[in-house]
Structures are given as structure tokens and as C-alpha cells.
Image: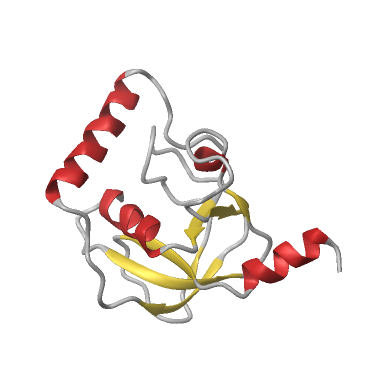
Amino acid sequence: MSSTENKMNELYSQTFYHGTKAYLKPGDVIEPGFTSNYGSRRKAKYIYLTATLDAAIWGAELSQGEGHERIYIVEPTGAIEDDPNLTDKKFPGNPTKSYRSLHPFRVVSEVSKWQGHSPEQLKTMKDHLERLKEQGIEAIED
């Protein structure tokens, strides 16, 4: 088996999460094409998932909208790739296990119990994202 095949088998044997404020139920599909939660809020070419609960918590906490923060366990329906917005710029080697896809994710279930970040951590992250925005730096590059 090639190293690429090993990596793909490893990826598809993991649990994947997606943090959002959208209300979804098992069997629902999350697709590209919706307004992005980040940057200039243009239509998202990709959708994002992670194999770490912490990264999904950030996704839920930083997402736009008035809904309740939610984290879903999802399964990819097609190929996924490392998220270059994090892995190429902030965390080489992908320690956050963050990925993106052009293909939908199917909602398996909702994570009902999780602990969010402290108000201080959340404020620090939001302040950082605001500074990037003021500098004209997009948080998401498609």
C-alpha cells in the first residue's frame, strides 16, 4: 500500500467535526456555496472539518449568526485535503488536523457536551481576527 493510500485510510478512520451555529440533524448535508463565516463573507468554495474537538469549538465560537453554537460529527462524502489557511501559514504539518473539501459532509450526530474557550481566550482570538481584517488580510483563501 502506498503512503498516499495509508494517509487516506488513516483520514477516513478518524472522527471528524464541524463547528457552526446552524441547526442540523443527522443525515443533513453541509455543502460548499454558503456565505463564509470569515473574511469578506463571500460564497465559500470549500467547507471545513477537523479531527480535533478544540478546532471545532473554535469554529463554532467564531461562526457568524445568532444561533446556538453547535458541533457536529460529520463524514466526508468525497476527497478532503489539508486546510492551507492553517497548515501552510500557521501550523506546518497540520497539528490542528484541519481539512477542507469541495464535497459535502453528512451530519452523523451532534456533540452535546463540550467546553468552550474562556471569555479571555475568545476575546484574544476575536481581537486578532479583527486586526487581520483591518490589515486587509483574509482569514480564508480559496
> Which residue is rendered at x = 30% and y = 20% of the image?
134
Q: Is residue 64 visible?
A: no
| Residue 108, percent from left and from top | 47, 80
Question: Which quadrant would residue 24 be assigned to in this image?
Answer: bottom left
Tell me: 47 left or right of 111: right
Where is residue 93 drawn, in percent x and y? Answer: 59, 45
Query: The N terminus appears in which quarter of the rendering?
Result: bottom right
Position of residue 97 relative to residue 104, above or below, is above
Q: Is residue 52 above or below residue 14?
A: above
Q: Residue at x 36, y 46 (%)?
A: 37
Q: Is residue 89 visible?
A: yes
- Counting from the top left corner in percent of width and height, residue 43 is at 47, 43
In the displayed orientation, state which residue is furthest to the left.
Answer: 119
Compare residues 80 and 10 and report the one nearer the observer: 10
Residue shown at 38% from the left, 59% from the top: 56
Check the image and report above or below for 12 versus 60: below
Q: In the shown orientation, is residue 131 left or right of residue 80?
A: left
Position in image of residue 131 (x %, y %): 28, 24
| Furthest residue toward right | 1
